Image: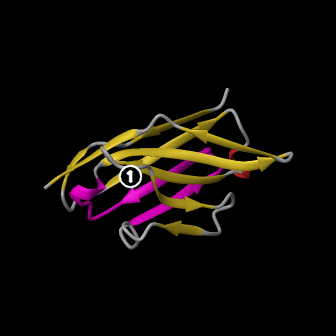
Amino acid sequence: QVQLVESGGDLVQSGGSLRLSCAASGFTFSGYAMRWYRQAPGKERELVAGITSVGGIKNYADSVKGRSTISRDNAKSTVYLQMNSLKPEDTAVYYCNARATVAGHQNDYWGQGTQVTVSS
């Protein structure tokens, strides 16, 4: 059974930091690109950061670039998102996503999300 379980969301003050974690199971984690998305109330889900299967390439949304770092530990089947200098506009539910093409079929898995709230 495929599972992505996010954790680490919290209520923090503006300027604070959080590290989100996403623990994966039920699939070959090291073969999947991993991404963090977020969705704020009344807004569409947006890509925050992504990392390739072996971690060689990372990309970030302009809104978090320079303040966030995505990383992964394939031995632990876990992806992380370190967020610093948090702003109220970072408030959202953060979702973990795993994606890969396996035998010609695109697998796309999602976690249930973790709430990040940044107070001003």
Q: What residue is at 49 percent from the left and 52 percent from the top?
A: 36
Element under disc 1: strand
Q: What residue is at 21 percent from the left and 49 percent from the top?
A: 12
Q: What residue is at 49 percent from the left and 60 percent from the top?
A: 49
Check the picture and name the quadrant holding the N terminus.
top right
Left or right of 46 in this view: 106: right
Work out which residue is located at the far right of the displayed protein and give it: 103
User: What x and y, as percent, mark residue 40?
Assistant: 33, 47
User: What x and y, as percent, mark residue 35?
Assistant: 55, 54
Check the picture and name the quadrant holding the C terminus.
bottom left
Q: Magenta segment, which residues?
A: 68-90
User: What x and y, as percent, mark residue 5?
Assistant: 51, 35
> What amino acid type is highlighted by mark number 1?
Arg
Determine if the magenta segment contains residue 64.
Answer: no
Determine if the magenta segment contains residue 89.
Answer: yes
Q: What residue is at 30 percent from the left and 44 percent from the top?
A: 41
Residue located beneath label 1 in the image: 19
